[in-house]
Image (cartoon, coloured by chain):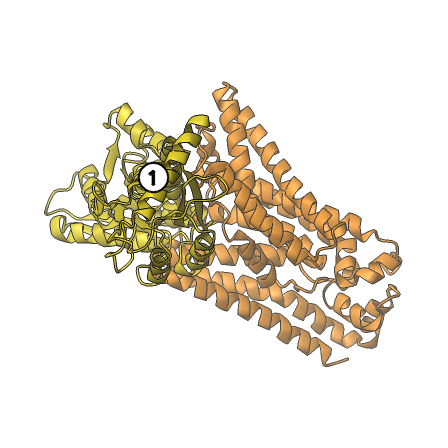
């Protein structure tokens, strides 16, 4: 799949998947298509195997998902229903949205831990904004529009703070976003005293309800975002640069990519998506809850990692992340429907993450051998 | 300000006199409490489990209101989100290092926090327990609580009433907890189960779930219960995250008035959901009163060095709020924010 994108004439090659990994090792400074082409030219017969193997991460994820749906449905037939799929997608929409933003961040070689508390903070602040417009007598549609803008703006602001901490204060992303994770949660608690913020438009919750089969408006919105994000990450120059930075930021700088500018864009995007996820959670809970996003950063990172991205950067697919987030939310809902002791949920998620990462490592090992 | 300063000055004198007269307390067995030298005011430390919990926030407000009335300071501390002895012990040790005049503490574990309470008492800092208590209460000035086990029993009564319980029929209910390790949640569940076993044998708990302190996770749990158990007639939302998750799930699925929801803690938003009929009943504690009484007891003891008039153990009743509760009562028990 990846080699097909190679143009050979672009300044930066399609530095994806294994190509990025090999580039780090083989051509740390000069970014030319050489690494990519030589890999293909040296082993043309291997190319098919490489393609199949690369594609297989997502094939395996689809199989895992189907097996889970099948297993849960056998144990509890009601699982295979529009009702349960609707429940899954309601929970999936915000997690998928932050996982998409996280995919860009992780591919760029960073990490964004702040998305969980950004969901909380933006939901709470949007809640106050909507309570104000509602009590001022504005129509509910307008209130919700304002709420979405405020939520996205809050998230974007958090993202820009992250970018500033990384670019200007020179903090590593883990520390920078760990700081904003704590600060965001703290500010939300200071504002709310721990109690949910109500008083918004009364029909807010109806927007979160599955309307077209299992699909709600937020789920459809997220699907549209996924398509657009996939286009930008995998076919546009923006995405190629993100991969390049994650593969080797020195090399990316050497070919004239402004790394700080892309750091700003990527964390801004992640923050804005988390803000919108906060708005979706507001609609789901009909209130700005000070606990709406607790721990969601780990769900986002887990989804991205299960999806096949490498935490060292330069590797990842939107499709993998989408499947990863679907698997996570399906497990959570499935274990509830099947009525398994809730303590097992964490164990199952842990096994999934470990299995996905090990699968990745094993596959990479197989690729290395021919070289 | 001037008024309170004068009263604080008088208090300092009173304490000084009491100390110089060598009145022994029999409670703390030590000298009178410390008076902060900087302000000359008594300082009451209120150390809680999770300081962001609205229950403890309301307790803080009650304590502060009483403190400003009595002309004393209150410092409020606790781990912001984690209710656990591991996080509470360092906090209480830090607070004791600042030498407060008195300590009001909600111990997160009866055994683990005993040492910190003993240390305070041995340093001459009188201790009041609020909400929960340590194992050995002999030297603790007083204990003020709204009993969580009793709250769970009241919740079972409220839910049975809302479901129009009658013997011979089966009623499916689900219970949402914050986690399996939250002691308050577990106490409430114990009381709930005891009351069901005793009075409502037809009530079956078909599902129990954890929100992991995330209201959106609570929402996912409850959405799935409502789908998987179409005959579900009642939900007991043991903590705030589950009340938020359950009330939204019931609304989203159009099951208001069909599934009875009993929640815990009277946050403003929950009280407004009672008025809408989404939450059938709320078990309200009286954290503001707990905070007020804790400050009263400590200040009384510090100023008079005398335990006369201090009730050793106070159990405040849990109040059940429903749609038929008068507006003034709803307002009275709504936690301040």
Write down which chain is painted yellow.
B
Q: Relative to residue A356, is residue A99 depicted above or below? A: above
Element carrying mark 1:
helix
Drawn side of residue A267 relative to residue A297, left or right: right
Quadrant of the rendered structure where residue A143 is? top right
Q: Quadrant of the C terminus of chain B?
A: top left
Query: Where is residue B25 drawn, in percent x and y?
Result: 26, 51
Residue A238 visible somewhere in the drawing = no
Residue pictured at 30% horizontal, 29% vertical: B332
Query: Where is residue A219 drawn, in percent x and y?
Result: 53, 43
Foreground of the two, A234 or A291: A291
Query: Where is residue B138 drawn, in percent x and y?
Result: 23, 57
Residue that extends furthest to the front in the rendered view of this protein? B21
Quadrant of the rendered structure where residue B93 is? bottom left
Foreground of the two, B320 or A362: B320
Residue pictured at 53% horizontal, 45% vertical: A186
Drawn side of residue A11 relative to residue B34, left or right: right
Write down which chain is painted orange.
A
Q: Relative to residue B223, is residue B267 depicted above or below? A: above
Give the residue number, with chain letter if any, for mark 1.
Answer: B14
Query: Where is residue A222 drawn, in percent x and y?
Result: 58, 44
Q: Relative to residue B161, is residue B225 depicted above or below? A: below
Drawn side of residue B201 relative to residue B19, left or right: left
């Amino acid at each position: 799949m990846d080699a097909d994108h190679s143009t050979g004439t672009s300044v930066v090659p399609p530095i994806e998947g294994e190509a990025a990994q090999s580039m780090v090792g083989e051509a740390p400074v000069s970014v030319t298509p050489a690494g990519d082409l030589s890999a293909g030219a040296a082993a043309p017969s291997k190319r098919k195997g490489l393609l199949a193997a690369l594609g297989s991460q997502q094939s395996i994820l689809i199989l895992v998902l189907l097996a889970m749906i099948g297993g849960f449905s056998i144990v509890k037939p009601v699982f295979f229903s529009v009702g349960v799929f609707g429940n899954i997608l309601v929970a999936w929409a915000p997690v998928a949205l932050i996982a998409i933003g996280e995919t860009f961040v992780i591919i760029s070689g960073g990490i964004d831990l702040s998305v969980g508390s950004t969901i909380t903070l933006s939901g709470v602040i949007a809640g106050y904004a909507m309570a104000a417009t509602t009590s001022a007598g504005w129509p509910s549609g307008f209130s919700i529009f304002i709420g979405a803008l405020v939520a996205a703006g809050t998230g974007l602001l958090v993202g820009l703070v992250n970018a500033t901490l990384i670019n200007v204060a020179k903090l590593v992303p883990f520390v920078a976003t760990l700081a904003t994770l704590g600060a965001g949660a703290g500010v939300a608690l200071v504002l709310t005293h721990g109690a949910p913020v109500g008083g918004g438009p009364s029909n807010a919750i109806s927007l979160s309800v599955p309307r077209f089969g299992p699909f709600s408006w937020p789920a459809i919105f997220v699907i549209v975002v996924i398509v657009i994000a996939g286009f930008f990450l995998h076919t546009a120059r923006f995405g190629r640069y993100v991969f390049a930075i994650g593969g080797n930021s020195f090399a990316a700088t050497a070919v004239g990519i402004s790394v700080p500018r892309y750091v700003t864009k990527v964390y801004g995007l992640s923050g804005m998506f988390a803000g919108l996820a906060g708005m979706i959670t507001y609609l789901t809970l009909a209130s700005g809850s000070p606990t709406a996003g607790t721990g969601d950063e780990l769900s986002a990172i887990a989804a991205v990692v299960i999806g096949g991205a490498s935490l060292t950067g330069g590797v990842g697919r939107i499709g993998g992340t989408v499947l990863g987030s679907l698997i996570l939310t399906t497990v959570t809902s499935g274990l509830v429907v099947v009525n398994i002791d809730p303590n097992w949920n964490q164990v199952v998620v842990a096994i999934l993450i470990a299995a996905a990462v090990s699968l990745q490592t094993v596959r990479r090992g197989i690729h290395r051998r021919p070289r | 300000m001037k008024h309170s300063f004068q009263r604080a000055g008088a208090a300092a004198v009173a304490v000084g006199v009491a100390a110089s007269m060598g009145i022994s307390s029999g409670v703390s067995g030590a000298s009178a409490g410390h008076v902060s030298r900087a302000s000359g005011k008594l300082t009451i430390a209120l150390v809680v489990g999770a300081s962001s919990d609205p229950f403890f926030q309301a307790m803080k407000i009650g304590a502060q209101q009483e403190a400003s009335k009595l002309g004393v300071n209150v410092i409020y501390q606790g781990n912001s989100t984690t209710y656990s002895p591991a996080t509470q012990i360092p906090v209480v040790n830090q607070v004791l290092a600042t030498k407060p005049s008195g300590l009001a503490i909600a111990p997160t574990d009866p055994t683990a926090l005993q040492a910190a309470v003993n240390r305070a008492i041995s340093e001459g800092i009188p201790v009041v327990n609020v909400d929960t208590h340590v194992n050995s209460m002999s030297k603790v000035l007083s204990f003020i609580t709204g009993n969580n086990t009793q709250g769970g029993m009241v919740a079972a009564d409220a839910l049975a009433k809302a479901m129009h319980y009658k013997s011979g029929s089966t009623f499916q209910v689900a219970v949402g907890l914050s986690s399996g390790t939250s002691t308050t949640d577990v106490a409430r569940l114990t009381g709930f189960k005891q009351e069901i076993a005793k009075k409502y044998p037809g009530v079956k708990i078909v599902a129990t779930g954890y929100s992991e302190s995330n209201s959106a996770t609570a929402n996912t749990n409850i959405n799935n219960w409502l789908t998987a158990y179409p005959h579900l007639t009642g939900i007991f939302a043991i903590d705030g995250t589950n009340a938020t998750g359950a009330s939204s799930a019931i609304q989203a699925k159009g099951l208001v008035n069909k599934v009875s929801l009993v929640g815990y803690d009277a946050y403003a938003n929950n009280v407004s959901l009672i008025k809408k009929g989404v939450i059938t009943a709320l078990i309200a504690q009286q954290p503001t009163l707990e905070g007020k009484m804790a400050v009263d007891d400590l200040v009384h003891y510090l100023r008079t060095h005398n335990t006369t008039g201090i009730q050793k153990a106070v159990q405040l009743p849990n109040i059940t709020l429903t749609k038929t509760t008068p507006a003034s009562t709803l307002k009275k028990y709504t936690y301040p924010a």
